[in-house]
Amino acid sequence: MNNAGAREILTRELAPYCEQSYEQLCGRVGAGPRVSEVVGPSGTSYQIEVDAQWNSKPRGNVQVIGSIDDGGWRAFVPLSTSFIKAPDGSFVAE
């Protein structure tokens, strides 16, 4: 798997979630991961999972975690990134 290309795809796929309000992200908590498949510029097929969860307590900060793999060995240890949004809509430093 091309890690740089996969990270670029994952960043692009998480961008719409970064734009969502805190309340919208709260609505995703507990819904389970959203899974999609994307084909990269090289023709490699990637599976992406995005999940939202409470960071420490209900109605506190929301952490959104995205992971990507190509179905190879990376499926066991996917490349991942995340962000945390506070109730006031600000991003929390990780």
Image (cartoon, helix red, strand yellow):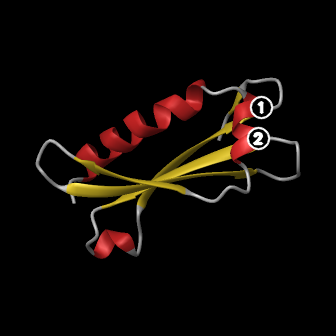
Residue at the image point whose x is 57% and y is 50% from the top = 65
What amino acid does circle 1 point to? Glu
Instruction: Determine whether the residue tagged by mark 1 lies in a helix, strand or loop.
Output: helix
Residue 9 position in % (x across, y down): 32, 41
Q: Quadrant of the C terminus?
A: top right
Residue 76 position in % (x across, y down): 40, 75
Q: Quadrant of residue 41?
A: top left
Q: Is residue 80 left or right of residue 72?
A: right
- Density class for disc 2 (Cα within 10 Å; few <14, some 14-19, many ≥20) is many
Using the image, determine if residue 43 lies above or below residue 11. below
Say which residue label 2 marks.
26
Residue at the image point whose x is 57% and y is 30% from the top = 18
As drawn, the label of residue 23 is 1
- Density class for disc 1 (Cα within 10 Å; few <14, some 14-19, many ≥20) is few
Residues tagged 2 and 1 counted as in contact (Cβ below 8 A) = yes
Residue at the image point whose x is 17% and y is 55% from the top = 44
